[in-house]
Image (cartoon, coloured by chain):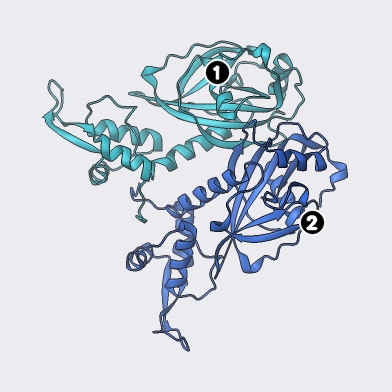
Chain colours: A blue, B cyan
Amino acid sequence: MISKKMHKLNPKISTDCVIFGFDEDGLQVLLIERKPIAGPTENKALPGDLIFDDEDLDDAANRVLKELTGLTDIFLEQIGAFGSPERLSKPEDKKWLESVRQYPDERVITIAYYSLVNKNLYQPQASSFAQNAVWVPVEQVEDLAFDHFEILQAALKQLRSKLRTQPIGFNLLPENFVLSDLHKLYESILGRPLDKRNFRRKINKLGIVESLNKKQTGVPHKPSLIYKFNEGNYERLMKEGYDNFGF
Amino acid sequence: MISKKMHKLNPKISTDCVIFGFDEDGLQVLLIERKPIAGPTENKALPGDLIFDDEDLDDAANRVLKELTGLTDIFLEQIGAFGSPERLSKPEDKKWLESVRQYPDERVITIAYYSLVNKNLYQPQASSFAQNAVWVPVEQVEDLAFDHFEILQAALKQLRSKLRTQPIGFNLLPENFVLSDLHKLYESILGRPLDKRNFRRKINKLGIVESLNKKQTGVPHKPSLIYKFNEGNYERLMKEGYDNFGF
């Protein structure tokens, strides 16, 4: 564990993390609540902070996420840099920065990361300047501190475009599942309904799932076939990707 | 035009540009040659420099590209941030930084951008600390200053993954072309041969080209059908993207 005292903060570079969590309630995003200096509405932000001047960017993102929310062992993928000179200039954000930063007027460029995790496996614990760390349904997020809403939208876009070329779900669903669980996962990420038959046909064509030739028992509806992921095909497609073009 | 004298440089953030150029000789990349302080072999670098402290990232990339190579009006897409604390520490790079930077020991994180242009339309003109600005075939690039080789690889990866979900070629080929021109473009970007029949079938299925029902004349081989892009379909697919999954 890196101690803050041994490292100089880089006053011009920060990192912010968009952690999506999936469970039976749909797609959520992990937000922190700052101390209520700025009034209740603008209080929510992505977990983020300045990097150390001798720290790798990926390491910084993992450290900051851990310091603010307690979450560890999350594979973070970079979204990119967000650096509008105006990104910290909302009055409520300025007030908050004055309360926590040594150089609150410094222009800060942030390197944003994202991940998608099984929400049931992660219990956030707020610390440092985060008063609270909460999962919020993505579609309920309307505004965030700084340019974090814009960063959230970019993360969503990157996650959705990943659906086009890579399988998803292995770490998000239980070992055995029914196809409507996977269907719900895709719908949650895309934020819109998908035709069920079409979806099943495509998933079967990809070969990433296989039926156990068993049906659900004790369900109040017509029992569905139980599936598991075909690990070999899944991993191969994670590596190779797929595309309409088939090159 | 922004004057350097009016703006303070941000000593911790730079921008680097990967400009791919396509013509009948295949895929090239635009490199600058630094003054030969460091010996001839490590002299080539991507066009890049520090940003101003009050400058938007995209604007900085366009300005720096113009200052070093004279190229303007290029749509640059962000690749991401590259920030290893060791990225400037090769001895020849340090020597060069000492000759041009006010704070040569400062850690610099770079925001990288890329574009793909029709090489015939751009004549680079070196200026500032660039002694020369040259197009180099991508497959001939073996090493570059700083972490620029790594950035070039990331740009190639992003360009190639774009081929999977978006049409390409509209600004790179003449108005009328034969399908083997388009085939060559795809092969150049992917850096590997593609089966011709398969390629034609897929391109036709996408609907981005249409035949003029005319054949080449005066060619020393069997004349091929002449095509043009179907602008409507091309633009629609640029917006929507395509994918095997068809969501």
Which residue sits at x=40%, y=62%? Answer: A193
Tell me: B4 left or right of A154: right
**Amino acid type of the residue that numbered disc 1 sits on in the rendered structure:** Ile
If the image is split into quadrants, where does the C terminus of chain B sit?
Answer: bottom left
Q: Position of residue A29 (x, y in %)?
A: 61, 57
**Which chain is home to disc 1?**
B
**Amino acid type of the residue that numbered disc 2 sits on in the rendered structure:** Ser
- The answer as to whether the residues below labels 1 and 2 share one chain is no
Q: Does A168 sit above or below residue B163?
A: below
Q: Does A124 sit above or below residue B242?
A: below
Q: Which residue lies furthest to the bottom in this view?
A: A218
Which residue sits at x=67%, y=65%? Answer: A122
Tell me: A10 left or right of B190: right
Name the foreground residue: B29 vs A135. A135
Tell me: A129 left or right of A240: right
Q: Where is residue A1 in the image (x, y as percent from the top left)?
A: 81, 52
**Which chain is home to disc 2?**
A
Q: Where is residue A77 in the image (x, y as percent from the top left)?
A: 59, 49
**Quarter residue B82 falls in:** top right
Mark 2 lies on residue: A127
| Mark 1 surroundings within 10 Å by alpha-carbon count, few (fewer than 14), some (14 through 19), many (20 or more) | many
Which residue sits at x=40%, y=53%? Answer: A242
Q: Position of residue B13 (x, y in %)?
A: 67, 29
Mark 1 lies on residue: B32
